[in-house]
Amino acid sequence: LVVLPSIAEESFGLVILESMVFGKKIIASDLLQIKETYVDSIEYFATGDSDELATRILNYLILAKNNNHIIDYSYDLNKYSILNSTLI
């Protein structure tokens, strides 16, 4: 599980992409650039809402416990390739 509880805008959120490579569940603040980049690939919580964040973390831990293991996630990393970027 990787949590990105940022309160300042991030341009890309490289830590999210790095976590995707390792198949980690990701919960991030619902900052505009992060949501525009990762759309529905990750889970979001309202920036600054610690209760919502705690609930999302707890839900993940309950799910992992019920499955008797930490859950690996699969992401389509090709979407985030520099070759697919509108910047080039």
Image: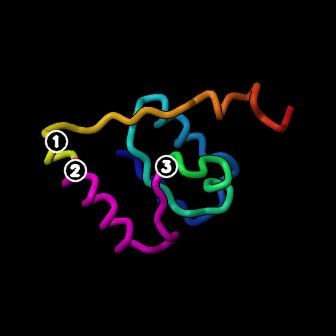
Q: Secondary structure at mark 3?
A: loop
Q: Is residue 42 above or below residue 58?
A: above
Q: Along the line of sight, which residue is nearer the eye, 64 or 28?
A: 64
**Crowd band around label 3 with a 10 angstrom C-alpha radius: few (<14), some (14–19), many (20+):** some
**Crowd band around label 2 with a 10 angstrom C-alpha radius: few (<14), some (14–19), many (20+):** some
State the separation of the CA atoms marked 2 and 1.
6 Å
Q: Is residue 3 above or below residue 81?
A: below
On screen, residue 21 versus residue 50, left or right, reads right
Where residue 74 sits, quadrant-wise, is top left
What residue sits 48% from the left and 73% below the top?
A: 48
- Mark 3 and mark 2 residues within 8 Å of each other at the beta carbon: no
In the rendering, at what x and y percent does residue 66 appear? 14, 47
Could you tell me the amino acid type at mark 2?
A: Leu
Q: Is residue 34 above or below residue 46?
A: above
Could you tell me the amino acid type at mark 1?
A: Asn
Residue marked by disc 2: 63
Q: Quadrant of the C terminus?
A: top right
Q: Along the line of sight, which residue is nearer the eye, 78 or 29?
A: 78
What residue sits 46% from the left and 54% below the top?
A: 43
Q: Quadrant of the N terminus?
A: top left
State the separation of the CA atoms marked 1 and 3.
20 Å
Where residue 67 sits, quadrant-wise, is top left
Where residue 55 sits, quadrant-wise, is bottom left
Residue marked by disc 3: 42
Where does the magenta region start and end? 42-63
Residue marked by disc 1: 67
What residue sits 46% from the left and 65% below the top?
A: 45
In the rendering, at what x and y percent does residue 37 appear? 66, 48
Q: Which secondary structure dominates the residues rendered in magenta?
A: helix
- Mark 2 and mark 1 residues within 8 Å of each other at the beta carbon: yes
In the rendering, at what x and y percent does residue 14 appear? 59, 40
**Crowd band around label 1 with a 10 angstrom C-alpha radius: few (<14), some (14–19), many (20+):** few
